[in-house]
Image (cartoon, coloured by chain):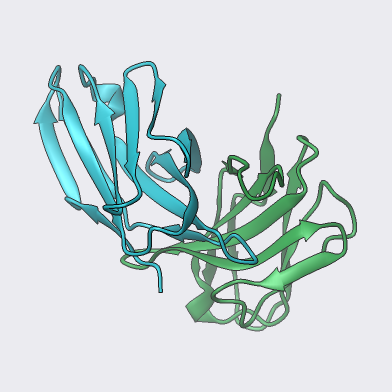
Amino acid sequence: KQEVTQIPAALSVPEGENLVLNCSFTDSAIYNLQWFRQDPGKGLTSLLLIQSSQREQTSGRLNASLDKSSGRSTLYIAASQPGDSATYLCAVRLGDSNYQLIWGAGTKLIIKP
Amino acid sequence: EAQVTQNPRYLITVTGKKLTVTCSQNMNHEYMSWYRQDPGLGLRQIYYSMNVEVTDKGDVPEGYKVSRKEKRNFPLILESPSPNQTSLYFCASSLWVQGSGEQFFGPGTRLTVL
């Protein structure tokens, strides 16, 4: 059964630092992996989607990588800002008949001014 | 503006009183789904729909119903709500390009069942 783990559960860093959030999954037979951001009491915003055939995707200060063989993905945030404070979730889409999304529990990120 | 909308955003109700949470998307997406989010348990899928009149159970379907009579709408129905259904609910949609579609989420509905 696919399991998705995000470590650490919480992270606090000073503004301006570069940081890496981790996502690991137990079964490499995934269709794609998606990173989301969730602000308190609000919905989820899609940040980056990496197809299983891709190694990385970039959007502005964000870069997500995917290593299927090792079951890992990282989300790199460059030059962090207080506005980046949120909970970051990763989800893998299975390649089975219903293409179910399996979610990590998230990393709560706090950027200190 | 491309979006997924949910109504209501907040709802407090009592045990046993039937309710419906509406979900609508304006992106012509085939795939729609409902999730609940609970502290410590993360997001869990309740039901999903691959297209009109096609729905299927997710991980936690007990106590919920859905329908997909139109492509844009996917309401979530609680026939007899119970306190354990107190949660934050999200509707999501995506294009169904062999599962590669990016998921878009609604703003969430916070439900409290007393």
Residue at 50% from the left image edge and 70% from the top image edge: B86
Decide if residue A99 is on the left or right side of residue B41. right
Q: Nearer the viewer, residue A60 or A43?
A: A60
Count of numbered labels shown in the rendering? 0
Q: Residue at x 34, y 32 (%)?
A: A64
x then y, percent, for residue A80: 21, 21
Q: Residue B2 or A2: which is nearer the viewer? A: A2
Q: Quadrant of residue B41 in the image?
A: bottom left
Residue A11 in view in this figure: yes
For the point 41% across and 58% down, the residue is A103
Q: Which chain is cyan?
A: A
Tell which of A80 and A56 is nearer to you. A56
Q: Quick check: B62 left or right of A101? A: right
- Answer yes or no: is residue B66 visible: no
**Residue A67 location (% of width, % of height):** 31, 44
Q: Quadrant of the C terminus of chain A?
A: top left
Residue B91 to residue B26: above or below: below
Query: How far across and how far down the image is residue B95, in percent?
Result: 71, 42
Residue lying at the far left in this picture: please name it: A14
Write down which chain is painted green: B
Q: Nearer the viewer, residue B89 or B41?
A: B41
- Please identify the quadrant where the N terminus of chain A is shown: bottom left
Q: Identify which residue is drawn at 68% across, 42% down.
A: B5
Q: Quadrant of residue B76?
A: bottom right
Q: Where residue A74 sits in the image (x, y, percent)?
A: 27, 39
